Amino acid sequence: MRLVSLAACGLAWALVTLASAGAHIGVTPGLVVAGDTQTLSLSVHNDLDRPMTGLSLTAPSGVRIVRAGGAWQALVEDETATWTGGPLAPNTGGRFEIDLEVDESTPTGPVQLQAEQLYPGDGSLPWPISVTVIPRPANESSLDSLYIPGLALIGVLVLAAIAALAGLKRRRGRSLQEQ
């Protein structure tokens, strides 16, 4: 079961990473845990021929922006974080940070953050940013707590079997030479 969960999380991460590869605002990591707070890094590229002077990010229901950081001046109000300052010159990129708190009751799967690159004269360029909510790992049961020691024991047994086979092979080789 644990392996299936890890595989599903890996697949979700790969899909989010591939989906954000073509976006103008990427997010790393693309996974957030329900019932937890996580720092995300936003990678923003200004493709326009004028400077970007701000960035706005709005979180959906069940997701709360706890903190906004980076080199620009940041303000968090209700479900929206706004960065001002810069500017970010044309054809350049920048990084911004946010701490997101995801309610434990938030359903697993993709959620959309709404971002807007802000430009002088009330210009803006909207971008949806998708992150995937994954379930909080269950408390370790007695079987889970045996997982790592069990793997270690299997590893020791495999090494012992290899050593025993190597020893038998050497003994057989000596027996044949003695005859």
Image (tube, rainbow, N blue to C red):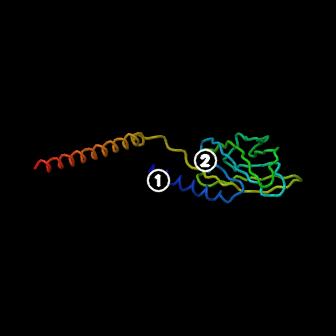
Q: Is residue 65 left or right of residue 143?
A: right
Q: Is residue 138 left or right of residue 109?
A: left
**What is the distance, in whole Å, between disc 2 and disc 1 at their CAs?**
18 Å
Residue 149 % position (x, y): 38, 39
Local packing at callout 1 (Cα closer than 10 Å; few below 14, some 14-19, many 20+) is few
Residue 122 % position (x, y): 87, 53
Q: What's the residue type where badge 1 is placed?
A: Val
Residue 15 vertical position relative to residue 144 in the rendered view, above or below = below
Q: Earlier in the sequence, mark 2 or mark 1?
A: 1
Q: Which residue, given by chain and number where applicable, does mark 2 sit on? A: 32
Furthest residue in direction right, as rendered: 121
Q: Is residue 92 left or right of residue 112?
A: right
Q: What's the residue type where badge 2 is placed?
A: Val
State the residue at coordinates (66%, 47%).
62
Residue 48 vertical position relative to residue 164 in the rendered view, above or below = below
Q: Secondary structure at mark 1?
A: helix
Question: Is label 2 in contact with label 1 (beta carbons under 8 Å)?
Answer: no
Q: Could you say which is closer to the camera, residue 179 or residue 158?
A: 179
Q: Which residue, given by chain and number where applicable, does mark 1 sit on? A: 4
